[in-house]
Image (cartoon, rainbow, N blue to C red):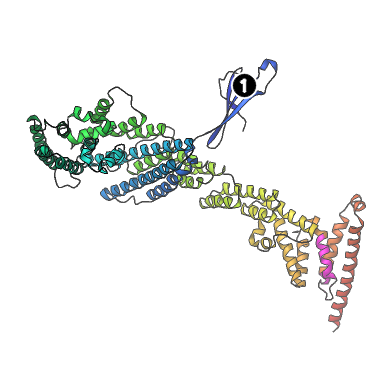
Amino acid sequence: PPLLVVPGADPSARQLCFAWGPAEALVCETLFGSRGTGEGGPSSSRLFVVRKDQDIYIQTLRKLFNESHGIFIGLQRSEEELAGKSRKAQLVQVSKNYRSVIRACMEDMHQAAISARDPALHSQYSTQVSILSAMELIWNLCEILFVEAAAAGPLLLRLLDWVRLHVCDVDNMVREVLSSENPSKHELFWNVVDVFVLQGRMDEARHLLSKEVSANPTSVNMYKILDDLMKKMPVPSLSNTQTLTEMELKWQHWHEECQRYLQDGTFASNSHMESICKILLGDEDAILEKKELLTTWYHFLVTRLLYSHPTVKPMELRFYAQSSMDLFLGGESSPEPLDTILMAAFEFEMHQVIKECSIALSNWWFVAHLTDLLDHCKLLQSHNLYFGSNMREFLLLEYASGLFSHHSLWQLGVDYFDHCPEYGRVYLELHIERIPLNTEQKALKVLRICEQRQMHEQVRSICKIMAMKALRNNRLGSALSWSIRAKDAAFATLISDRFLKDYCERGSFSDLDLIDNLGPSMLLSDRLTFLGKYREFHRLYGEKRFSEAARLLLMLMTARIAPRSFWMTLLTDALPLLEQKEVIFSAEQTYELMRCLEDLTTGKSDKQKFQEDDVETMKVEMLRLALARNLARVIIKEGTLEGS
């Protein structure tokens, strides 16, 4: 396509020209000569290819696209009839399957980053690890809040698991301390205890504190009290064994007990234990002092809720989330895109989550699959876009369109289009026509997809393209096969003529198997019918079934199946039959042959006769002689039969 100049560009300055492709744009920066001088051509240019979805070309992300495709198809075919808890459990499992694919891909990318020797490649892989990590973090939160829709109580436990899974910055420090000979003497010992407390991992914190007591007997009383407080801390239950009211009452009593010990100065002589007691009381300042161990505002949020409001309700999260982010960032830094996305999730603004992810992430995979899952959860039903499609379909169409620009991933895109009821068919028709048909195998694959979906126009188009390619490469058999498949009578006639021309030049047919097995396909065009029948004549002749061959040969001319230009060849083919010892043609058949020969010769102008060479004239004379002799033989034979 021609390059288009960006509207409004200054003709005397550098201009930006572009041409759109199916999934990419060709951009060209050009400086055109002044119109006054009559110089119209560009004086310099640089070309850039701008791809719409660069990530699909990253080899290590292939697992993400391939494996998630199977999960997506399974979800579309899943039992919609399942109701209540069983349907929710099914959707939560689908969500976990998606996350496991993200995590597996992240592991592969991490290994690739470690083994990459090229610094640029290492940097690229590390960036992808960060992006995949952020994707899983967001997805996991959406799973808790939207898919599982965890209620007050279990909600906090899910958020704790979420933080423990995703805040990994301190894991190395924990391993270092625990693997040392004397953990309680390690300089980072109390940091690790604090990490366990901040993440609500009480059993691990108590186990580590017991090592401190055995090394420092003077703090045994303080340890016992703190250990008892940590042991008795009420935690919400995933089962329905206790009501929220019971949980709140227990927690209130425990909280007052912690408060009493702190006010009594029980831990005054040990600043570390006193700090832990303050954290247990939900003291915001004490928790914020551990900012470096928390690493993120959302970890601070979950720790704050654990020790100040463990029975938080889903709709209360927005207030705690906003204040936690403000307190943690403290005006020192502005929120990153990830912070904005997580905040939108805590505020239950699903559409905002999808919008922000579309802007921030480098591909459509995430938003397309998350939106589809949320749509199956019946959470996006009311949201239609002003340009005619709903959000789910719009994002799936964008994702699948990106896949179609890849040489092999386009096959996945077909299934995504299939599950877009409004525009999927139209998009598939447009994209499938743009697939380069490099090999016959690929063409057959594309053709099968079109035939399965009754895309007749595309089927014809593909067959015509392949027939033309085969014809250009002089592969007549393949060209004929494709034209028959396309039901293209004109093209089948053209190729049949080529077969006949080759036969006249070489005296034999190529691709005999195809011509012998044309079957009903030969009725596609008159010329193809003639080709099939003419080949049948040669087969009968080769099998010495001369009478049948003679009848067929005559029928080809008298029924006007054979093109007139080919009659001389047919009459020449009759010569060996006329010369057989046994009489093959009857008197009536011989008269028919004579009439055909006379039609052929008398129909020519004087100029044509003058131009005929001696060989052609000799052929006609030989045929007349052979026909006359055959007629004489027939009359004698028939007369003898009558006389006897």
Tell me, yes or no, if residue 361 can be seen here.
Answer: yes
458 vs 535, left or right, is left
Q: Is residue 29 left or right of residue 415?
A: right
Q: Name the residue carrying label 1.
A: 31
Identified at 80% across, 62% down, the residue is 570
Q: Position of residue 125 (x, y in %)?
A: 44, 38
Q: Position of residue 252 (x, y in %)?
A: 10, 36
Q: Amino acid at mark 1?
A: Leu
Farthest residue in the top direction?
36
**First to last magenta residue range:** 569-588
| Residue 21 position by quadrant | top right
Q: Does the magenta portion include 585?
A: yes
Q: Main secondary structure of the magenta part?
A: helix
Q: Nearer the viewer, residue 425 or 75?
A: 75
Q: Quadrant of residue 195?
A: top left
Q: Quadrant of the C terminus?
A: bottom right
Question: Residue 7: x percent and y percent?
Answer: 56, 22
Query: Where's residue 569, x and y in %?
Result: 81, 60
In this view, which residue lies farthest toward the bottom? 644
